[in-house]
Image (cartoon, grey):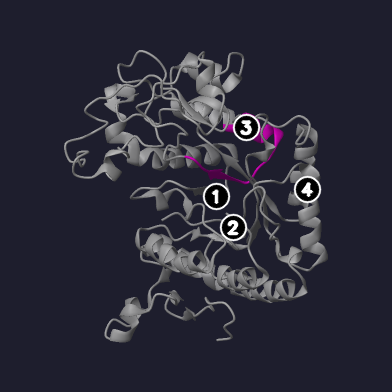
Amino acid sequence: TTLTPYWSLGFHQCRWGYKNVNDLQTVVDQYKKNQLPLDTMWSDIDYMDQKKLFTLDPVNYPGDKMGNFVKSLHSSNQHYVMIVDPGVRIEKGYEPYEDGIAKDIFVKNADNSAIQVAKVWPGPVAFPDWIHPEVSDYWTSHLRQFHNQVPYDGLWLDMNEVANFCDGHCVLDVDYEEDWKELFSCPCHNQTITEYDYPPMWPAAGMSAEYSRMPPGSSTISMSSTHYGNQKEYDMHNIFGHLESIHSRNALLDIIPNKRPFIITRSTFIGTGHYAGHWLGDNYASWDDMRNSIQGIISMNMFGLPMVGADICGFAGNTTAELCARWMQLGAFYPFSRNHNEIGAASQEPYSLGQTVLDISRTALQLRYRLIPFFYSQLFQVSLASGAAIRPLFYDFPLDLQCRSIRDQFLWGRDLMVAPVLKPQATS
């Protein structure tokens, strides 16, 4: 597996809903004021102009302010990571789209006659075809141009399953107004169904109505979409995020030479751990999701992705002071440790939930920072000889039958056992 940069083992703060650069600066200042360690500040899609890839909102995130903000982070030995979605808005005059058309690097429709159109945050989008021979130059070029404006330190690859707010068999028309009135609706006035959309192993409608309504193209592009060399999405789908991680890592090695790349991706495949880390995706501010994150992190380590974490305090919904305090304690032992939540939810930075949460969070993070040399050593060993940095107890105590059923504790290497509090109103 790839060895993550040392700084990435520090604490990370993000949320969807920071309105402008001043919000980012306020968060950084509050961490410092409250004596909370913070290594990396993140941006969700808020920074973009109309949610378009490789753009900055000229009013709320103007280039000069963003550049100065990131430089100020660097002057304090802190770092900046931004979200990058693969969907490129279909818009005349928009450089990433025009360049993609010129290089012919977008995924095509079923008969390879036109771009495969999808719908995500910017509206109508095309997706880079990661097996096209020109796509690496395309991706590196635009990441470099953006880095010249905002000298980011890492990439957060999201929506790369690849996600689509329509189902793949729905044929979207960029010029048909009804297709774009509502972002999360899909009129599906025109459909193309092929053998790839309902493969032979898929349950028939009479056998399972539930699954017949959710074919492989649900919430993604059509399985009959065409990649370079006439390869079908049906055969390429599972490695879309994996290939994006490879191209992104290669780009960072070129743009930021002599430094280890830092990439967190949502979609993974066998071998992605050689190129990127992972977070467990959108979770809920619930005790169940906090508890389940342990199993998720153990599983991803077994799959060869040691740099993994969950959204601390929960992404969706409003957290509580008790839940967030316990999650900060647990999250201090995630390999990738980041507090993140959604737009519209209550603030959950550790300083925003009262003195008790602040004190508990500070103590937990101070312990994490004392343990970072140990964490890094474990990840270094894994990068050399494989294995799992985070592991279930039965890995090291295979003859202890009781360990086989323990799901709420885990080991960091062979020497540190973590047994967090995972229930409300519990004290042990």
Q: Is mark 2 on a helix, strand or loop?
A: helix
Q: Name the residue under label 1.
A: 262
Position in image of residue 30 (x %, y %) = 80, 60
Q: Tell me if I can see residue 400 in this picture.
A: no
35 vs 39: above or below? below
Q: Mark 2: few, some, or many residues within 10 Å (few <14, many ≥20)?
A: many
47 vs 178: above or below? below
313 vs 254: above or below? below
Position in image of residue 310 (x %, y %) = 52, 60
Where are the magenta residues, as a range? Answer: 143-159
Q: In this view, does 313 lie to the left or right of 175?
A: right
**Is tag 3's residue or tag 1's residue first in the polypeptide sequence?**
3
Position in image of residue 105 (x %, y %) = 43, 22
Q: Mark 2 points at which residue?
A: 8
**Is tag 2's residue or tag 1's residue first in the polypeptide sequence?**
2
- In three-dimensional space, the C-alpha distance between marks 2 and 1, rounded to whole angstroms, equals 7 Å
Q: Nearer the viewer, residue 26 or 375?
A: 26
Q: Does the magenta stretch include residue 308?
A: no
